Image: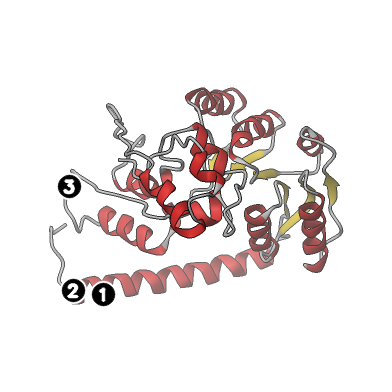
Amino acid sequence: MPDRFARREFLKMTTAATAGAALAGTMAARAADEKAEKTVRIGIIGTGGRGHGLMGVMLSMKGVQVPAVCDINPAALQAAKDSVVKAGQPEPAAYGDGPDAYKKLLARDDLDAVLTATPWDLHAPITVAAMKAGKYAASEVPCAITMQQCWDLVNTHEETGVPCMMLENWSYRRDNLAVLNMIRKGLFGRIVHCHCAHSHDCLDHWFYDKQGNKRWGGEYLIQRNCDQYPTHSLGPVLSWMDINCGDTYDHITSTASDPIGIYEHFKRKFGPDHPALKTQFKQGDIVT
């Protein structure tokens, strides 16, 4: 395959590929209509903003049913039940009586898969429990926050054989998938270096709210100094460079700046007397 393509040749190639994909999709849809469609039954653990949003996407898909939901926040749990009913499905069983409520959901025998969208520290424990219960397991980002949790996920998958996936959305952006396709087509030759970054200041809506009150995620800025979810930047690159699918990391280094911007944010927006200015933050502004 030549190292370089003319622009017109590349457009012809991608147009043909798109048409082919559309035709294949139409043929697959017709074949599916001819067979009895299998319903995929998914339980949702964590039905707050992120979990509820993901559940909404699933409810819009043909052949997906949500028989059970779980959240210790009564309002979030009720909102999830209402959304399932509004989508035309039976009211789901609801679990919310304490931090171990998810175990009751996992004990059900009518679920094919479980999606976890809880606070971060629960992602790995719940995902491990889901695999042990024989349910396909999907975890929001990050799927683990310690090395031990990473090994727990790997070991449990290898012991049970149950699939497990972290839902890293940046790996599936159209532009990142387009780059992956071009790499596999050989347009760039051999890839020897990639540079990636995730420049997204989440301080005033993810870790703290607009009024400067700490949300559950804010505790991680106090306790940890790290790239809080590195796969937003690394996810696409792992595919581009075949990491763990032909190549591996030899070593990883991480360097962080001081938390200067965090303090400046609260001082500028809320004044010098805001309680956050007395908080000892570990999280640096920039992690490389």
Left or right, 68 with reference to 60: right
Q: Are marks 1 and 2 in contact (CB under 8 Å)?
A: yes
Tell me which label, 3 or 1, sits earlier in the chain. Answer: 1
**SS class of the residue under badge 1?**
helix
Rendering coords of residue 229 (x, y %): 45, 43
Q: Quadrant of the N terminus?
A: bottom left
Q: How is the image coloured?
A: secondary structure
Rendered location of residue 238, percent (x, y): 35, 43
Label 2: how many Cα within 10 Å (few below 14, some 14–19, many 20+): few
Instruction: Give the percent coordinates (x, y) of residue 94.
Output: 84, 48
Q: Amino acid at mark 3?
A: Arg
Q: Secondary structure at mark 2?
A: helix
Instruction: Choose between 163 and 125: the one closer to the eye.
Output: 125
| Residue at the image point whose x is 76% and y is 44% from the top | 111
Residue for badge 2: 7
Give the left or right position of residue 256, taking residue 167 as reference.
left
Q: Are marks 3 and 2 in contact (CB under 8 Å)?
A: no
Residue at the front extreme?
A: 273
User: Which mark identifies residue 190?
Assistant: 3
The one of 176 and 242 positioned closer to us in this rendering: 176
- In-image side of 169 versus 96 (left or right): left
Q: Which mark is residue 11?
A: 1
When the figure is inspected, residue 20 is found, relative to residue 172, above or below; the finding is below
- Between the residue at mark 3 and the residue at mark 2, the CA separation in whole angstroms equals 20 Å
155 relative to 102, above or below = above
Point out residue 168 in the picture as x, y percentages from the top left corner.
Answer: 48, 48
Q: Quadrant of residue 137?
A: top right
